[in-house]
Image (tube, rainbow, N blue to C red):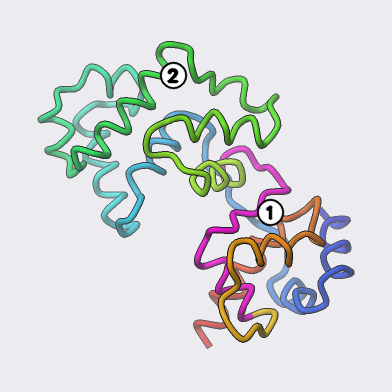
Amino acid sequence: MEHALQHLRRVDPALAPWIEQIGPFALQLQPHGFATLAYAIISQQISLAAARAIRDRLVVALGDLTPTAILMAEEETLRATGLSAQKSAYLRDLAARIASGQLELERFPTLDDETIITQLTAVKGIGRWTAEIYLMFALGRLDVLPAADLGLRDAARLVHGLPRLPSPRELLALGACWRPYRSVACWYLWQARRLIRQS
């Protein structure tokens, strides 16, 4: 990780002082597996508090959050937890793909990033952003840049003093120099944005 930080300080002078101020890289990983992917679907377009409440109600209703539990659950049970009909369908699609062996999560640690993104985005309700966030926060991949992330684009604007929000394509171009540690740079940008917003 020290090599990664040295690289980022060298290639991005605007990010370097933030790395010093924020300190050690401390991205907290989530467990790799169905429950984390399910939570990613649940949390789309709602607040974190609402997403946690729905997840907690699902665990109470079903026990462990597993593909089998989702597939066996009555639709009324899922809807009673606060899930929309659309998200219920997304969870069932994810669960069915895993149960059938179509999606082999246990193989993910051995696959490259783009292969994982292709497999995940075949699931209803999982787009590229969700797949990229999963790569970063569940699989600990170090060279991911979720360029569509609005918070990340805003962080790049603030840290680099840009006159406007960069487009996803512009953010990819800006972050090309961070390779092969783009995930690390993203984490520092998110932290820098939080600090700037608090000041």
The quarter holding residue 116 reads top right
Above or below, 101 against 147 in this view is above
Q: Is residue 100 left or right of residue 151?
A: left
Q: Is residue 16 left or right of residue 159?
A: right
Residue in the image at 27% along x and 26% along y: 63
Instruction: Give the residue type that dot 1 points to.
Output: Ser
Residue in the image at 66% along x and 65% along y: 171
Residue in the image at 80% along x and 54% along y: 179
Disc 2 and disc 1 in contact, CB within 8 angstroms: no
Assess whether residue 153 is covered by the magenta stretch.
yes
Q: What segment is highlighted magenta in the picture?
A: 138-158
The quarter holding residue 13 reads bottom right
Q: Is residue 48 left or right of residue 24?
A: left
- Bin the neighbour count of mark 1 within 10 Å (Cα to Cα): few under 14, some 14-19, many 20 and up: many
Above or below, 190 against 130 in this view is below
Q: Camera-side residue: 169 or 54?
A: 169
Can you identify the residue that label 1 sits on? 183
The x, y position of residue 46, in whole percent, is 30, 56
Can you identify the residue that label 2 sits on? 98
The x, y position of residue 90, in whole percent, is 32, 33
- Of the two numbered discs 2 and 1 on the same chain, state the one appearing first in sequence: 2
The x, y position of residue 109, in whole percent, is 66, 28
Label 2, secondary structure: give it. helix
Residue in the image at 75% along x and 74% along y: 15
Q: Camera-side residue: 8 or 169?
A: 169
Q: CA distance from mark 2 to mark 1?
A: 27 Å
Assess whether residue 74 is covered by the magenta stretch.
no
